[in-house]
Image (spheres, grey):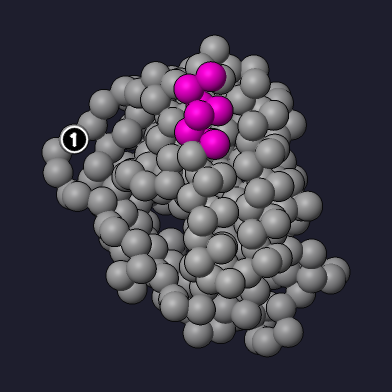
Amino acid sequence: MQPLVTIIVPVYKAVDYLDRCVASLCRQTYENMEILLVDDASPDESGTYADFWASADGRVRALHQPENQGVSAARNRGLDEANGDYVCFVDSDDWCEPDYISHFVTNMTEQKAELACCGYFADGGLIKATVNKPLSRHLTQGEMLQDIIKPGGDIRGFLWNKCYSMAIIRERQLRFDTELSVMEDQLFNVTYIRDANVFWYDAYQTYHYVTHGTSASHNLSAKTFASEMAALDKISDVIQESDLRLSLQKLLASNRTSLNDAFKNKE
């Protein structure tokens, strides 16, 4: 029997993008999926759009948060409701190629991976897209941790270019840190990788990451600066359990320096 894949989509002020996102998921060539649209008490009609898609496709479920709690709480709600063997996270303003899920399932099953990574397009130009080349390989835990922590590269701390094993998430009771407003995805990835062993990277591009000039991830303020520093501290605590903690701590120290310099230059 084919593995069930849960796709979790946090939804907030997404009326301009949600139809394109969900339509791309419903058109996946891999059909054994459940798509969880988690409406984070959005003040616009996003919740209504989610309900429409739930009525149009039996694989879609609309979940409504009683009050706005943030993206981490929305993803945690999705994890609480997930029935899948694997889980992917998709942002509501992004969209996917038709073989996004099928490629993940192939790589997770054939490579016996506990985490699979894909290539991606960058629609908007604020970050660099991956190179669509025939590159696929296993990575060690140390390589994965370094690729998650460093600010550049093809893998990074994103959620949407990865497929996770729900068995590990359930066994370790992994959830997103609701105290963080930024870099919660990187912290989740570092924690997950600490508890996993087999990692696979495939450069084939299947995800469209849409960037906007006003995106929170691209605007540094005193609030986001403090949040990023707090996230780096929590990541540091997690990697204390890694055999590579010395080299990883040096990388984190470099990240802190770069962040501090960027903040000073904005003042």
Please tell me in which quadrant of the rendered image residue 23 appears: bottom left
- Establish if 18 lies above or below 7: below
**Image quadrant where one finds the N terminus:** top left
Which residue is located at x 44 percent, y 76 percent? 212
Residue 148 placed where, x, y %?
A: 46, 38
- State the residue in front, 95 or 63: 95
Instruction: Residue type at mark 1: give it.
Output: Leu
Residue 218 placed where, x, y %?
A: 49, 68
- State the residue in front, 132 or 65: 132
User: Callout 1 environment at 10 Å: few (<14), some (14 to 19), or many (20+)?
Assistant: few
- State the residue in front, 228 or 101: 228
Please tell me in which quadrant of the rendered image residue 9 appears: bottom right
Q: Is residue 91 left or right of residue 52?
A: left
Residue 248 placed where, x, y %?
A: 51, 27
* Secondary structure beneath label 1: loop
Q: How many marks?
A: 1
Q: Is residue 251 magenta?
A: yes
Which residue is located at x 56 percent, y 62 percent? 263
Which residue is located at x 76 percent, y 52 percent? 178
Outermost residue, right side: 66
Q: Is residue 98 left or right of residue 162?
A: left
Q: Which residue is mark 1?
A: 135
- Establish if 183 lies above or below 264: above
Q: Is residue 49 visible?
A: yes
Q: Is residue 47 magenta?
A: no
Residue 68 placed where, x, y %?
A: 79, 70
Which residue is located at x 18 percent, y 35 percent? 135
Outermost residue, left side: 134
Magenta span covers which residues? 246-253
- Establish if 49 lies above or below 238: below
